[in-house]
């Protein structure tokens, strides 16, 4: 067991507010784990901060016509504040625009540079002559070669999901001026990740208790083979490359952002009055480093950053990276651009933080994508928080107030049921511990609520409303047992419901200093007075959640994604243009995900006269196994296109509904038949 734990949460971009997807990915799980470990008495700190460099910041600034500094100052403050209100208990929340971060990142770069690790390579890149700058991927727009969407970006088509390079686009233009960019030569420093392939395979293979989704994504990258990765780019906003020949270039955000964990820890240590204390957490082998992230950050935290740390030589490596998958919203992919999101700031204006902490905790996308819905939110608050936990505590404390003058009764001549029920406190505590230690937070929450269920069943079975007259001793035993369970719950539920459990501990007289190892079947002493408390959880009415659903739909409609807002018709064409398309009936006979791509599926289609390999950006809508046997319509005379190193020979026609969900265009015709 290590002496200390360093927890980091992925640095959110300071270009917009925090939404539920952010919380479910990297922040609520980290907070649950950190609070649990603090109760266990561990030396643990939780480090995070704003990622204030990179293209997303400059794009947000361009849209608003303000400086990047104005954008990051605004959202850093807002996001830091809303995390605090939600109960995310960071020890330090830094920012990558700080001088400490700038120096730390530059020193890290120079350390690797002095080791002669980097290679300098020339490459051709789009350049906007009017803006006088090289164009990052997101600053190039054009027509997607896969689906024909006219507003695709240089890194990805947001309509079909295909991963792209700027040079893949048809008729590319600068997103800054609308001009057609020229191709110009530039030069950058690269880290040869292939040099670390063997070490990474061995290191990742030696990790214990890593999630299968994390290991799977790592192996897919390693199986494909690691190549060179640029660590600098041509931008005016970011950490400047600390070399004379690097003038006008900055460190690539993927390189400097994780270094933000180190720089933020340095700033934390300075505030503690011990500037060198950061070294204890980053350079002492008896530190356990754990990164909490979303699945889109797996490759950076499990392959690239460990390679950087290993090469530098002065830092500990991550012990675990418990990445979560994505959270959907009301059955649809969460999308801020389409208005399909629930912002934490708005939520907190109408609801208590603990309600969302609990409900979101029960639906965390720990190994696969999960879904948040307002109806489920209402159901869990009402049936679990109110009817199980709240009802149990209220029954217990109100009965004690009314019939035992608010004093904890003696346990006298307990029955087997009394004793076995008290033993459940330790049994459930052990189950909860195992779940937390293995990063199974949904299970931890379930097992914690299970103790409240046990208490409720016991209260009902022992019928204290009858025994208070017929057998006062038995009634007192019932309340003694239930009060001990309530006291235990006030601690065991602390990581999930910190505000409500603080309220409950005050009511029961449980000291705030109580530790996890002090939770047992006799936290409260006989004769100890408890206060009359309020109901912990009020039920949520139908009209309340209906209002939230309508708000969500209205926002989506305002953003142009309502049910009545169909994609506009394209320009009129001549019949001969249409007739030039060779559409054929086909059947999918094999399918598998494309390695290193979250969007693409490699599909083998039987066209009757031959079999074709076609790449399709439908992975977020379909699993490969479920589409085998599917009848399809194929554009069979489309020029071959190479993506992710695989040649795609055709296009499978899909229909997209108004919610952005894709559907196959089907035909019962024999494979190979013309579709006219």
Image (cartoon, grey):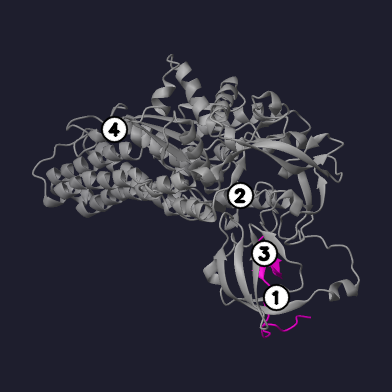
Circle 2 crowding by C-alpha within 10 Å: few under 14, some 14–19, many from 20: few
Circle 1 crowding by C-alpha within 10 Å: few under 14, some 14–19, many from 20: many
Provide the residue designation for mark 1: 633
Q: Nearer the viewer, mark 1 or mark 3?
A: 3
- Please give the name of the residue rendered at 69% of the width and 80% of the height, measured from the top-left corner: 585
Q: Position of residue 191 (x, y in %)?
A: 58, 39
CA gap, disc 2 and disc 3: 48 Å
Task: Find residue 647 and name its label.
Answer: 3
CA gap, disc 1 and disc 4: 67 Å
**Marks 2 and 4, the one that precedes in the sequence:** 4
Which element is circle 1 on? Answer: strand
Which element is circle 3 on? Answer: strand
- Please give the name of the residue rendered at 68% of the width and 83% of the height, measured from the top-left corner: 609
Provide the residue designation for mark 2: 547
Q: Nearer the viewer, residue 235 or 415?
A: 235
Instruction: For residue 608, say whether it is visible.
Output: yes
Circle 3 crowding by C-alpha within 10 Å: few under 14, some 14–19, many from 20: some
CA gap, disc 2 and disc 4: 36 Å
**Marks 2 and 3, the one that precedes in the sequence:** 2
- Please give the name of the residue rendered at 66% of the width and 25% of the height, measured from the top-left corner: 243
Q: Quadrant of the C terminus?
A: bottom right
Residue 209, placed above or below residue 288? below
Q: Is residue 100 rendered to the left or right of residue 310?
A: right
Q: Is residue 606 rendered to the left or right of residue 403?
A: right
Provide the residue designation for mark 4: 508
**Marks 1 and 3, the one that precedes in the sequence:** 1
């Amino acid at each position: 067991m290590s002496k200390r734990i360093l927890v980091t949460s992925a640095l959110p971009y300071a270009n917009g507010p925090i939404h539920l997807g952010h919380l479910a990915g990297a922040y609520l799980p980290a907070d649950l784990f950190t609070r649990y470990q603090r109760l266990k008495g561990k030396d643990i700190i939780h480090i995070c901060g704003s990622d204030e460099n990179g293209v997303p910041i400059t794009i947000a600034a361009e849209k608003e016509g303000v400086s990047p500094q104005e954008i990051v100052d605004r959202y850093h403050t807002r996001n830091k504040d809303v995390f605090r209100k939600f109960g995310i208990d960071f020890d330090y929340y830094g920012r990558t625009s700080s001088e400490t971060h700038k120096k730390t990142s530059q020193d890290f770069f120079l350390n690797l540079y002095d080791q002669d690790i980097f290679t300098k390579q020339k490459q051709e890149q789009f350049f906007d002559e009017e803006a006088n700058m090289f164009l990052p991927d997101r600053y190039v727009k054009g027509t997607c070669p896969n689906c024909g969407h006219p507003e695709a970006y240089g890194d990805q088509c947001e309509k079909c999901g295909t991963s792209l390079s700027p040079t893949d686009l048809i008729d590319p233009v600068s997103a800054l001026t609308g001009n057609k960019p020229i191709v110009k030569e530039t030069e950058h420093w690269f880290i040869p990740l292939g040099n670390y392939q063997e070490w990474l395979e061995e290191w990742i293979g030696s990790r214990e208790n890593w999630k299968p989704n994390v290991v799977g994504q790592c192996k897919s990258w390693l199986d494909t083979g690691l190549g060179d990765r640029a660590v600098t780019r041509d931008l005016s906003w970011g950490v400047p490359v600390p070399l004379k020949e690097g003038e006008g270039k900055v460190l690539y955000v993927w390189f400097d952002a994780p270094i933000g964990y180190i720089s933020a820890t340095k700033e934390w240590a300075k505030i503690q009055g011990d500037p060198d204390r950061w070294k204890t957490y980053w350079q002492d082998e008896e530190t356990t480093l754990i990164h909490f992230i979303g699945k889109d950050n797996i490759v950076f935290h499990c392959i690239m950053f460990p390679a950087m740390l290993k090469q530098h030589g002065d830092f500990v490596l991550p012990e675990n990276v418990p990445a979560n998958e994505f959270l959907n919203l009301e059955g649809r992919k969460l999308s801020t651009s389409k208005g399909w999101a629930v912002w934490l700031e708005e939520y907190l204006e109408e609801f208590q933080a603990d309600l969302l902490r609990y409900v979101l905790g029960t639906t965390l996308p720990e190994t696969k994508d999960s879904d948040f819905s307002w109806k489920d939110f209402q159901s869990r608050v009402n049936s679990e928080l109110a009817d199980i936990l709240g009802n149990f505590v209220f029954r217990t404390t109100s009965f004690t107030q009314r019939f035992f003058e608010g004093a904890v009764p003696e346990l006298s001549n307990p029955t087997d049921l009394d004793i076995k029920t008290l033993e459940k406190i330790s049994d459930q505590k052990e189950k909860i511990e195992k779940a937390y230690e293995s990063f199974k937070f949904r299970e931890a929450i379930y097992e914690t609520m299970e103790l409240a269920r046990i208490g409720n069943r016991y209260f009902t079975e022992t019928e204290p409303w009858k025994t208070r007259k017929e057998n006062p001793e038995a009634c007192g035993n019932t309340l003694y047992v239930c009060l001990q369970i309530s006291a235990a719950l006030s601690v065991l539920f602390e990581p999930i419901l910190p505000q409500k459990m603080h309220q409950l501990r005050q009511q029961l007289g449980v000291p705030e200093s109580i530790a996890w190892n002090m939770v047992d079947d006799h936290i409260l002493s006989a004769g100890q007075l408890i206060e009359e408390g309020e109901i912990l959880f009020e039920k949520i009415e139908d009209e309340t959640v209906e209002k939230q659903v309508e708000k969500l739909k209205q926002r989506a409609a305002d953003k142009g994604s309502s049910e009545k807002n169909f994609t506009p018709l394209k320009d009129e064409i001549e019949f001969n243009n249409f007739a030039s398309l060779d559409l054929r009936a086909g059947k999918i006979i094999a399918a598998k995900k494309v390695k290193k791509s979250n969007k693409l599926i490699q599909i083998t289609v039987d066209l009757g006269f031959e079999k074709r390999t076609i790449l399709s950006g439908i992975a977020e809508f379909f699993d490969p196994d479920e589409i085998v046997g599917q009848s399809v319509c194929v554009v069979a005379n489309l020029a071959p296109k190479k993506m992710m190193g695989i040649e795609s020979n055709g296009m499978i026609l899909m229909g997209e509904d108004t919610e952005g969900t894709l559907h196959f265009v089907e035909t019962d015709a024999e494979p190979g038949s013309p579709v006219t």
